[in-house]
Amino acid sequence: MSRVHDALRKAAQENPEVSRPDADNLRGGSFARSPRLDGAFDKGFRQAEEPAEIGDIEVYIQNARRVEYSPLTDALLVNPSKPREAPAEEFRTLRTRLNHLQTLQPLHTLVVTSASPAEGKSFTAANLALTQAQLADKRVLLADFDFRRPTVDKTFQIPISPGMTNYLTGTASLGDILMRVGDSNLYLMTAGDAVPNPLELLNLRECQSLIGELRSHFDWVIIDSPPLLFAADGNLLATMCDGTILVVRIGTTTFDSVTRALQSLCENNVLGIVVNGARRGELYSKYTYYHDYYSYGDDAETSDESRGEYVEAK
């Protein structure tokens, strides 16, 4: 965690408005699980059902609709054909740490979130899912639970519906919303049609039952959620999952927002923090030896700005 503090302090020097509360305040607080919905809010939703049979979910997975891997050019996804690039290496480092944690504790469902918008949570969730799916023995699901500002459909250039909201409102089955990227180990679920009541949908028993069932069939279920300080959705999702990763962005995220975000989560549920937005030169300094040895052609000449944003797992 000290490296996170160092990164944020450096960001504070670049952005004088970044606040600096005491480090002791960065201890996670408790978050009360939201009460079950009253009948009035349930009106129009399907009635609570028993969780789907395990065999049925496996059939849905085996027969998932195939979609081509054709991501948005500006999505900044790691390139499997360039495995020695520093960004890909950072995500492999994050993957290794999470897979090690998985051997020590039950860990299959993971919420990736941030304190505020535009800090790189969706970028991190998508690249982590891609990196995990590159392992031959890992079956990975990337699910878009950000019903307010969904991104998975845009990133992978696939239809947004039917998706999660359609399943939760009873207008689509699990088989309708599950997609597989080519012949890879990566599966996708989009957010679905826009709804006026995202939090109420997440409070339905079907949501928790679905997450619980999916964890039995996927090595990793990676959930992209709304920012913690702008909606209660992420806090609720964190109580349903095995772990949470908080994404912060250098020069943008403040100490105060990190403090409040961590306090809104269950203390034992936070696995770590990913620092996003490092400059290319700072990140590549750790790989100088390999840059001297390998030739990257035109890529080595690319400027900081055009390279986009990168992450470092802490």
Image: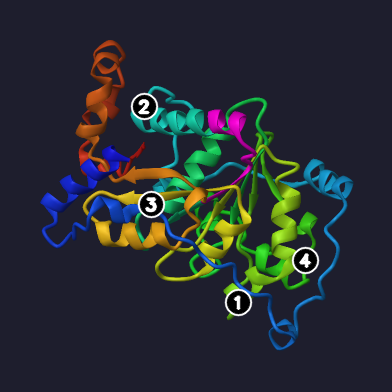
Q: For the magenta stretch, what is the residue range? A: 99-111
Secondary structure beneath label 1: loop
Neighbours of disc 4 within 10 Å: few (<14), some (14-19), many (20+): some
Q: What residue is shown with label 2?
A: 85
Neighbours of disc 1 within 10 Å: few (<14), some (14-19), many (20+): some
In the image, what residue type sits under mark 1?
A: Val
Q: Earlier in the sequence, mark 3 or mark 2?
A: 2
Q: Nearer the viewer, residue 139 or 257?
A: 257
Secondary structure beneath label 3: loop
Residue occupying the point 75% across, 59% down: 209
Q: What residue is shown with label 4?
A: 172
Q: Are marks 2 and 1 in contact (CB under 8 Å)?
A: no
Q: Earlier in the sequence, mark 2 or mark 4?
A: 2
Q: Are marks 2 and 4 in contact (CB under 8 Å)?
A: no
Q: Are marks 4 and 1 in contact (CB under 8 Å)?
A: no
Q: Are marks 4 and 3 in contact (CB under 8 Å)?
A: no
Q: CA distance from mark 2 to mark 4?
A: 40 Å
Q: Which of the numbered marks, if any, corresponds to residue 195?
A: 1
Let me know if residue 177 appears in the view: no
Outermost residue to the front: 24
